[in-house]
Amino acid sequence: MATVSLSSGVRSALSSLGSTKTDAQQAQFRLATGKKVNSAVDNPVNFFTASSLNDRAGQLTGLLDGISNGIQTIQAASKGLDSITNLVKSLQSTVKQAQNDAASNRPKVASTVDLGSANAAFPPTGSKLDIALNKTLVGAAAVDARADDPSTGGTNEATNGSVGIAAGTPGTNTNAVRIQAGSTTYTFEFSASATVRDLVNGINGSGIATASVGSDGKLTVTGTGSDALTIETGLTDDTTGAFTANATTDAARLFGTADNTAVTSASNSAVRSNLVKQFNDLRDQIDGLARDTGFNGINLLGGDKLSITFNEKTGSNKNKLDIQGQTITSANLGIGSAVDGTATTAGDYNIQNDTDLGKAADALTNVLTSLRSTASQLGSQLSVVETRQSFTKDMVNTLSQGADNLVLADTNEEGAKLLALQTRQQLSQTALSLSNQADQAVLRLF
């Protein structure tokens, strides 16, 4: 094969044209990919550095999904606590209703006899103790004798507001009244000359009951609490002070009873009985709601543990947050069941009893404090996770931008280069044509 010799002008033009074409192709490739470093051949340092930055950005992006799920899990628990708090407030309202009903329905023992006297302090004003009633109190013969005695004018039976009670045995015993409310007992004595006011003051001094005389002249004793109120009349031993219920004393008839059977009144209320179910239903809803606050299989109100990883490292360099949930139940919170009567299980509340209602109110107040503390803790942890989520997103953007700065092409610059190279390519082609024309001039000699 014959070797073709090119002139120096043609060869120079071809060399320039080839170089320009290569540069133009490179500029076109950079514009097409948007990168000035597409492989390690282009720039090994920038290529591997950018790859490392992109790898870390990818790992952090993967962690963002776990962080996002963690946030939703905490928010689910937080909303659950808000709802449980509302249920506890409803329980407080139920207890308040029971307390209001208890306050308006205290146990009462009402006399069936008229204690009205000539003493203007007790109605009916200016009246005398009814003779028939006085017969019941001190005996018919005594009343009849007094009523028939002109010297008395038939007024001795009600002199100065006296309740007309015969005296006990001097030196042996004294008339007395015993009042019992729950486990508290109070006893007071009074003489045969005691007035209605003395009787009222004696009852009021007990602290567990109050007494009043109505416009009908009848005595009403009302308990200061919700415990069943029992009143007995009898005698106290002057030596030992021991109280003995006595059916033979006139004091036994103060409340209209013909014997010494104790008079008892309970303050149980149908309204409070109906509140038992309402209270226990709300209590059960707390348990059900806590069980339903899980997210993606993790329930922080069911005692589950949540682990959220914040970086791509391992071992001691790994950064994560562990959140140990609490098992929220009405029992764990210290909310007992409501019962309509004496509570047989520790922690339960007798809806009919003031003391138990007070315990329930105090327990619910403590529960709200505990729930607010737990909610505050979850809120703090949620703030940490959200801060790390924001930081991770910013870090991913920083890493990606740093990698792009190392490998991305400047499209404006590459476009300008391509245009210049295309112009140079055209000029090189023109130069090659001119060089060929110079060689063809030899043909003219022939």
Image (cartoon, grey):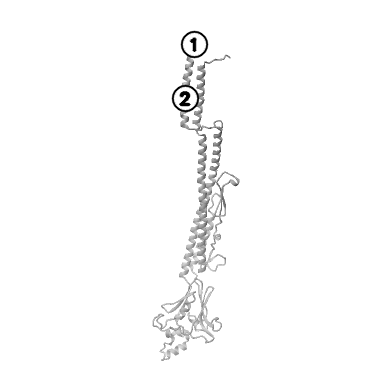
As measured in the structure, the alpha-carbon distance from the residue carrying label 2 to the one carrying label 1 is: 32 Å
Between 46 and 384, the one lying in front of the other is 46
Between 436 and 271, the one lying in front of the other is 436
What residue occupies the far bottom of the structure in this picture?
Answer: 150
Q: Quadrant of residue 332?
A: bottom right
Q: Quadrant of residue 59?
A: top right
Classify residue 114 as left or right of residue 302. left
Can residue 385 be seen here? The reply is yes
Can residue 285 be seen here? The reply is no
Q: Which residue has dot 2 on it?
A: 422
152 w.r.t. 293: above or below = below
Q: Where does residue 375 sit, x and y in percent of width and height? A: 51, 55
Residue sitting at x 52%, y 66%: 359
- How packed mark 1 is, by other alpha carbons closer than 10 Å (few <14, some 14-19, many 20 or more), is few
Q: Where does residue 431 sit, x and y in percent of width and height? A: 47, 19
Q: Which image quadrant: the N terminus?
A: top right
Q: Where does residue 428 sit, x and y in percent of width and height? A: 48, 21
Q: Which residue has dot 1 on it?
A: 442
